[in-house]
Image: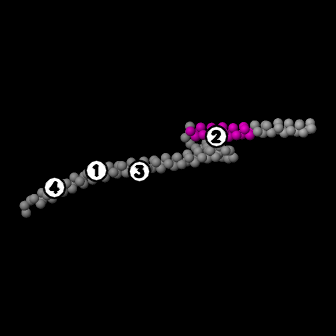
Amino acid sequence: MRYLLIVAALFMFGCVPNLQLQKVVVLKDQQAFVKAFDRVAVEQRIEPLEQFIITYPESEWSVRAADVVALWTRCRELQQENHALETKNRKLTDSLATSASEISELEEKIEQFKSNLIQLEQRPQ
């Protein structure tokens, strides 16, 4: 009976350090994720989270990091697309202003042509 009690006690005490070790590892993952995320915010680049995913592939935080990386990448793509559209919009606005100016000039020339035509028709033959 004593032997069984000693084995049970050793087993219980033997398991407790493993549980604490697992908590430390989880906290280490979480701390590393938070540090990487903070670096992303400060440095405005995604590489710290990409490195986190490589370093902790089995971590539950890697899934979250991968989501952030995907959103970051999509955001950058949309920013580039937005920049391209803004540039195109500026060019089209400039083109529209040029076209409006040309239309105004053509309208003046048409009015001059009409006036000249009327004068020409009113001249005696």
Relative image position of residue 55 (x, y in whole percent): 67, 44
Residue 40 colored magenta?
yes
Quadrant in the rendering for residue 64: top right
Q: Which mark is residue 101?
A: 1
The amino acid type found where label 4 is placed reads: Ser
Tell me the quadrant of the picture where the N terminus can be found. Answer: top right
The amino acid type found where label 2 is placed reads: Phe
Q: Earlier in the sequence, mark 3 or mark 1?
A: 3
Q: Which residue is mark 3?
A: 88
Cβ–Cβ below 8 Å for labels 4 and 3?
no
SS state under label 3: helix
Crowd band around label 3 with a 10 angstrom C-alpha radius: few (<14), some (14–19), many (20+): few
Q: CA distance from mark 3 to mark 1?
A: 20 Å
Q: Which residue is mark 4?
A: 115
Quadrant in the rendering for residue 116: bottom left
The amino acid type found where label 3 is placed reads: Lys
In the image, which residues are magenta?
21-41
Q: Earlier in the sequence, mark 1 or mark 2?
A: 2
SS state under label 4: helix
Give the residue displayed 16% in from the left and 55% down from the top.
115
Mark nearer the viewer, 3 or 2 = 2
The amino acid type found where label 1 is placed reads: Ser
Relative image position of residue 12 (x, y in whole percent): 82, 38
Give the residue displayed 7% in from the left and 63% down from the top.
125
